Amino acid sequence: MAEKKEKKFCIRCFRELGEKEKYCVQCGAPTANRCTYKGGLVGEPCGNVNDPDAVYCSKCGAPTEYRELGLIPGHYEAATRPREEEEDEMQAFNHPFFRHD
Ligand SMILES: [Zn+2]
Ligand SMILES: [Zn+2]
């Protein structure tokens, strides 16, 4: 039995979206609420797809694309950078490659 696909609607104009639409053909809004984190010195871009109402990425805490584009309201300013990430970067700098002693 085929799985019943959940209908998706545009976050902006509420049009029903086709399965393959990456952007709403009516208003141009992205149809997936991706994380905007593009990667840092050592980090990879996140690329996590969040729930349509997510203001911040559930994986890394960066603002989501819908938030950046002003498609959903954000009630809170961004918190400090996720701690995990800072520690990762510190570890990278302690890597033997960066040491000169
Ligand atoms: Zn739309
Ligand atoms: Zn993320």
Image (cartoon, rainbow, N blue to C red):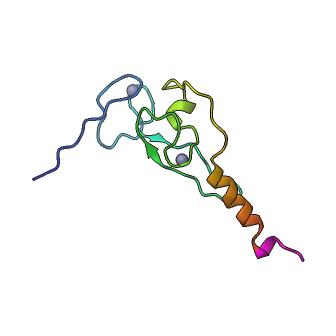
Residue 31: give x, y in percent of width and height.
40, 37
Tally of marks: 0
> Residue 23: percent from the left, percent from the top?
42, 36
Bounds of the magenta span? 96-101
Q: Nearer the viewer, residue 89 or 21?
A: 89
Q: Residue at 62% across / 29% down in the picture?
A: 77
Tell me what residue is drawn at x 39 percent, y 32 percent.
Answer: 24
Q: Does residue 88 sit above or below 19 in this rendering?
A: below
Residue appearing at x 72%, y 65% in the figure: 92
- Identity of the residue drawn at 66% across and 44% down: 81
Q: Quadrant of residue 94?
A: bottom right
Q: Residue furthest left?
A: 1
Left-right relation of 6 to 50: left
The reply to whether the magenta stretch includes residue 100 is yes
Residue 73 percent coordinates (x, y): 51, 23
Q: Quadrant of ligand 1?
A: top left
Query: In which quarter of the view is residue 96 placed?
Result: bottom right
Left-right relation of 66 to 6: right
70 w.r.t. 63: above or below: above
State the quadrant of the C terminus: bottom right
Up-down: is 86 above or below 33? Answer: below
In the image, is residue 45 part of the stretch drawn in magenta?
A: no
Return the residue found at the far right.
Answer: 101
